[in-house]
């Protein structure tokens, strides 16, 4: 193993899958512009050329439709949406087509499509360029939704997504791109349906996804100084959600807080809370708490962003209210 950043782990996963399987190709706005997608597609065009690295005009619906068609024809496309905000334009292709074809054809047709939705929040980019829309897509049956929080999973889950015969929405958050950890050089895959305990504890369970896992881990370390032992769970997948790992943890701790980087109403945190309340209510010693974005659009002001986006300090504050 060697230390690798999150963005370079994605890049390596793309290189290795394209080398291993000639059916894999990349299409999207800016995929031949390394700056635009945070170096994640750097040098791919030079290696594989314009037939397999297709930089397109801005047409989210058309690009995604092409990906769906290519997938049901036997290829393994990776459709890249450099800003997840504009995936709204592709909702018909994702929700009415990609997610449904396998079911509507009685399992005789597969849709091996990977869609990269990149969250590019912060930096005073305001409401139309800062959105994390994972909760919308986790509502749709027929499509898997994964959100790796570290470079190891970023590589392994992307490889697994590309090799999967079902459509997978792979969401990477640019706030994680500089994170580093040990990543194997060889090709490997990480599960698309399992969470992971990153810090063990027996006082309270903190369930998080994507960049909020890092904030949860920071919170757990600070809480440990006050002799509060928090267990941190990285969901990794939000559709399906690994309910078993959540219930096993709250059986031990009796308390649950969910940290999620999107809006509160109808969000990932709400679904996790529902799982705990319906399947593990008798395990809980205190009401469930959520740390999320407020139900308002993202501001276009640095000082307001500091208040808008939750961090480990907010998690610590909420944990201390849970007797």
Image: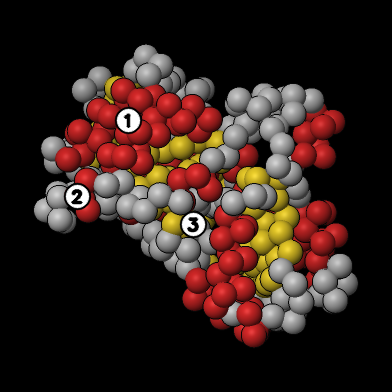
Mark closer to the chain start, 3 or 2: 2
Q: What's the mark number on residue 64?
A: 1
Mark closer to the chain start, 1 or 2: 1
Quick one: 3 or 20, which is closer to the camera? 20
Q: Residue at x 35, y 58 (%)?
A: 189
Question: Residue 2 at x, y = what percent?
Answer: 49, 52
Measure how far apart labels 3 and 1 are at the Cα level: 21 Å
Colour mapping: secondary structure
Task: Find numbered disc 2 in the image and state the secondary structure of the residue it sits on.
Answer: helix
How dense is the environment of label 1, judged by Cα within 10 Å: few (below 14), some, or many (20 and up)? many
Question: Residue 204 at x, y = what percent?
Answer: 73, 74
Which residue lies under the disc numbered 3? 238
Residue 258 visible within the image: yes
In this rendering, would 38 be left or right of 160?
right
Mark 1 near mark 2, Cβ–Cβ under 8 Å? no
Q: Residue at x 60, y 73 (%)?
A: 276
Task: Find numbered disc 3 in the image and state the secondary structure of the residue it sits on.
Answer: strand
Task: Find numbered disc 1 in the image and state the secondary structure of the residue it sits on.
Answer: helix
Q: Nearer the viewer, mark 1 or mark 2?
A: 2
Q: What's the mark number on residue 104?
A: 2
């Amino acid at each position: 193993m060697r230390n690798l950043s999150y963005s370079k782990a994605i890049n390596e996963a793309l290189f290795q899958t394209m080398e291993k399987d000639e059916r894999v190709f990349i299409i999207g706005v800016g995929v031949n512009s390394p700056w635009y997608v945070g170096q994640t597609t750097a040098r791919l065009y030079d290696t594989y050329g314009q037939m397999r690295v297709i930089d397109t005009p801005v047409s989210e619906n058309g690009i995604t439709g092409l990906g769906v068609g290519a997938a049901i024809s036997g290829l393994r496309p990776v459709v890249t949406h450099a800003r997840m905000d504009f995936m709204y334009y592709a909702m018909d292709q994702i929700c009415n087509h990609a997610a449904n074809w396998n079911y509507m054809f009685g399992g005789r047709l597969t849709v091996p499509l990977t869609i990269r939705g990149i969250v590019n929040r912060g930096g005073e980019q305001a409401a139309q360029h800062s959105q994390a829309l994972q909760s919308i897509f986790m509502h749709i049956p027929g499509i898997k939704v994964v959100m790796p929080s570290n470079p190891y999973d970023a590589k392994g889950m992307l490889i697994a997504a590309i090799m999967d015969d079902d459509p997978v929405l792979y969401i990477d958050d640019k706030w994680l791109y500089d994170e580093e950890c040990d990543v194997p050089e060889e090709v490997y895959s990480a599960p698309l349906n399992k969470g992971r305990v990153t810090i063990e504890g027996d006082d309270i369970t903190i369930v998080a996804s994507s960049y909020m896992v890092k904030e949860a881990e920071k919170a757990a370390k600070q809480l440990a100084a006050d002799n509060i032992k928090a267990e941190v769970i990285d969901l990794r997948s939000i559709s399906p959600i690994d309910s078993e790992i959540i219930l096993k943890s709250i059986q031990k701790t009796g308390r649950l807080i969910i940290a999620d980087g999107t809006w509160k109403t109808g969000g990932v945190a709400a679904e996790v809370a529902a799982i705990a309340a319906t399947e593990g209510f008798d395990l809980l010693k205190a009401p469930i708490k959520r740390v999320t974005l407020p139900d308002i659009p993202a501001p276009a002001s640095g000082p307001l962003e500091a208040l808008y986006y939750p961090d480990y300090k907010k998690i610590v504050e909420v944990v201390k209210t849970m007797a």
